[in-house]
Amino acid sequence: MRTKMEKLNLLKTNGMEIEEFIAKKESICFEKNFAESYNNKLSIDEGVAYRVVKGDKVGFANTNNIDDKVRVQEKAKELAKDGIPLNVRFPEDVSCESINEHMHFETSDVVKIQHCFEELCNYFKKFNCKVKLDKISNFRSVMNTRNTMCKSHDAYFKLTFESMRNEFGNGLSVFKLKYFRTRNELYNFAQKMNWELDRIKKLKTYYEIESKLPVIFAPQALAGLVLSIVENFNAKEVMSGTSILERKKFEFDEKFELYDAPKIKNSVFNVMFDDEGTRTYRKPLIKNSKCITYFSDLITEAKYNYKSTGNGFRRNSYTTMPTPNFINIDINNGDTKLDNYLNINNTTILIKQIMGLDINSLKGGFITGRVTESIIYKGSEAIGTLPPFSLKIELNKFFTDIGITEEVENIWGFMNIPYLYKDIMKIHI
């Protein structure tokens, strides 16, 4: 690992004007002092950075997108209005040879990297996911197809993840490309993934069905699952507060209570709203096992002084581990809380978020979705995560597991709602 001074020495120039160099940040920033900016902002391992220089006026813009180059140039023009003409150039005294030397991969590096990924690739095979690592010689041609500005380099790596249709249903066909410019970037990625792998391997994973590892739905994931069943099976009747099976007003499972209102802090459905008050779609208000109304109801919004804007699916961060909140889930009339359940069990998988739930296309009695966030718990301690995966639930078995003993011959006529607990919200899929 290079020291900051060693990295700084790499950036010294001999007057050559080069428009980009390797750096970490991806957002545009301008700084008055190069050393301060470098020490606080930059590394030379990934990304692309531009330097705007005029006398003691120094600025940086870090990016790997060609559109940001235009923004840098526009910023330079803006500063030039004050009579300070600026140009975008590489710091002085860096030669093309030193860049290529830094980027070059020896044969031993390729072997080491491939060995590093071998176990990872084998692991992803469990998820029926193809993983391929290629060395690319013509860096420029590849990057041009992605509309990303770059220089030609001696070697470049491409890591491809491609999920396939599998036993967990059709799921989503996902195709991801990850490009690595430097050895360090690739090593760091491999080490991080293998570190996660080592943590997961210490446990029986969700896919080892014979382990009977309990699966728990976090409130928001449970709510999404409930709403999908409700809206597809019984939308009109539920909207009117009538169940298909019993034809009674507000008929729900008495052992289940899911209560919520826009005014309740950290409430179950409020997790679907971002900091701006943006909501994704309408949510039911369920209190004391009864569906009172929906948040999209104007009376409800007026009552709680709640106003929705736009549509959701925005998050502040995709890098931090989500922290589930269980305070508004009561089981067995409040005798047991979900967080207590996590405390008394050894290992549990918590499904945090399910996206793309699909019932209509699978009329054989299945519901499928894409689990985008899941957490492995040992007791109450979060010790790992699982990669996104396709989830397929056989509803007849699911209903049996959660306490519905009568056979459901026609699930499309099945009514209702929060039949999602057996014992303590525990199911084995």
Image (cartoon, helix red, strand yellow):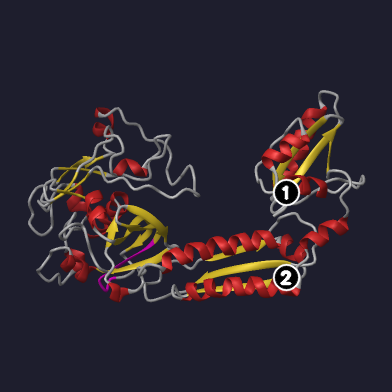
Residue 25 image point, x, y percent? 66, 45
| Magenta-colored stretch includes residue 45 | no
Q: Is residue 368 visible?
A: yes
Residue 329 is left or right of residue 86, and the answer is left
Of marks 1 and 2, the one in the foreground: 1
Q: Main SS of the magenta segment? A: strand
Mark 2: which amino acid? Answer: Ile
Q: Name the side, left or right, on which 397 lies relative to 207.
A: left
The residue under label 1 is 3
* x 51%, y 62%: residue: 195
Residues at discs 1 and 2 in contact (Cβ within 8 Å): no
> How many neighbours does mark 1 have within 10 angstroms: few (below 14), some (14-19), or many (20 or more)?
few
Magenta stretch? 363-370
Name the one closer to the observer, 294 or 343: 343
For numbered disc 2, what is the local secondary structure? Answer: strand
Near-viewer residue (182 or 364):
182
**Height in image: 152 above or below 129?**
above
* Residue 71 visible here: no
Residue 14, percent across and down? 92, 46
Disc assigned to residue 136: 2
Q: Please provide percent x and percent y for residue 318.
A: 49, 49
